[in-house]
Image (cartoon, helix red, strand yellow):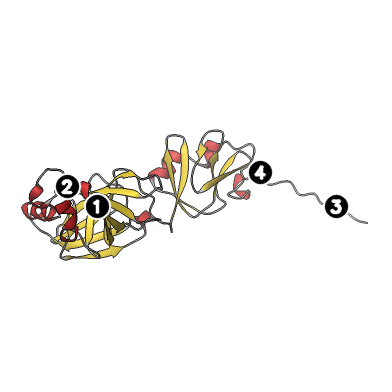
């Protein structure tokens, strides 16, 4: 005689994969974006993030059956109702106002090309730099002939993202005493995701070491100098 045994369906929400949730469980119990983003929660490809009915999908995500799913491994970021995943391994994605450290790759008429660890080289216009001595005036043809005295191939500099050109290239500027050419230090390259946005990216350690944390993953390490020396160094650029 044959007997059949029926198994009841599991009722534990943990039984369901991370990309699916129990229909009787509310989204809020699965993920609180405010709490998770406060700790920079890591996510994996295919992992459920939140409901597409509540939030909009951004880079690094896709929508499947009203659910926002991660398409890359990285950290979840939220801006209002927009949810994105910042990939762990990716090129630097610049924003206006970002502080970056770069290296001059080419000197062109009235501009320099700068390697800023992005998808394409950034542009530093001659009109966007300080003249020696901090002189404020329009750049002349004589200044264009002396561009290599300001920056030449291989020079390192710290600058700020000013705008973007039509092709997406960054436009940089060094019109500040704290920006300009970098000397007497060491360049360290790390993944951009490791550098957080801070109130100030110029840090002095108690051990007598100065750091410039570029949001593009380029970090400048040098011996601590006095503020007046830093100002003079910026004027040289």
For discs 3 and 4, the disc positioned in front in the rendered view: 4
- Regarding mark 2 in the picture, which secondary structure is present there? loop
- State the CA–CA distance, disc 1 to disc 2: 9 Å
Q: Residues within 10 Å of mark 1 (few under 14, many from 20)?
A: some
Circles 3 and 2, Cβ within 8 Å, touching? The answer is no
Residue 185 in the image: x percent, y percent? 18, 65
Residue under label 1, please give it. Answer: 110
Circles 1 and 2, Cβ within 8 Å, touching? The answer is yes
Residue under label 3, please give it. Answer: 4
Is the residue 91 above or below the residue 176 in the image? below
Q: Which of the marked residues, 4 or 2, is nearer the chain's N terminus? A: 4
- Regarding mark 1 in the picture, which secondary structure is present there? loop
Q: Residues within 10 Å of mark 2 (few under 14, many from 20)?
A: some
Residue under label 4, please give it. Answer: 11
- State the CA–CA distance, disc 3 to disc 2: 90 Å
User: Extreme right residue here?
Assistant: 1
**Viewed as shown, does residue 232 lie left or right of 210?**
left
Q: Which of the marked residues, 3 or 4, is nearer the chain's N terminus? A: 3
Q: Which of the marked residues, 1 or 2, is nearer the chain's N terminus? A: 1
Nearer to us in this view, 178 or 9: 178
Which quarter shows the N terminus? bottom right
- State the CA–CA distance, disc 3 to disc 4: 22 Å
């Amino acid at each position: 005689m044959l007997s059949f045994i029926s198994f009841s369906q599991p009722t534990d929400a943990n039984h369901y994969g991370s990309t699916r949730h129990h229909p009787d469980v509310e989204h809020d119990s699965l993920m609180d974006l405010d709490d998770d983003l406060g700790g920079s929660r890591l996510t994996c490809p295919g992992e459920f993030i939140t409901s597409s009915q509540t939030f909009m999908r951004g880079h690094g995500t896709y929508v499947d059956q009203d659910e926002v799913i991660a398409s890359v491994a990285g950290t979840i970021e939220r801006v209002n109702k927009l949810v994105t995943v910042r990939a762990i391994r990716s090129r630097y994605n610049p924003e206006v106002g970002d502080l970056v450290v770069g290296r001059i790759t080419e000197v062109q008429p009235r501009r320099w090309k700068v390697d800023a660890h992005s998808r394409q080289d950034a542009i530093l216009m001659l009109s966007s730099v300080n003249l020696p001595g901090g002189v404020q005036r329009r750049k002349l043809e004589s200044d264009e002939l002396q561009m290599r005295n300001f920056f030449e191939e291989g020079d390192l500099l710290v600058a700020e993202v000013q705008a973007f050109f039509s092709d997406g290239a960054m436009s940089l500027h060094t019109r500040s005493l704290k920006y300009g050419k970098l000397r007497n230090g060491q360049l360290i390259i790390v993944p951009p995701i490791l550098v957080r946005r801070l109130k100030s990216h110029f840090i002095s350690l108690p051990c007598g070491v100065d750091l410039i944390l570029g949001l593009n993953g380029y970090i400048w390490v040098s011996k601590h100098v006095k503020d007046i020396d830093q100002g003079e160094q910026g004027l040289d650029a």
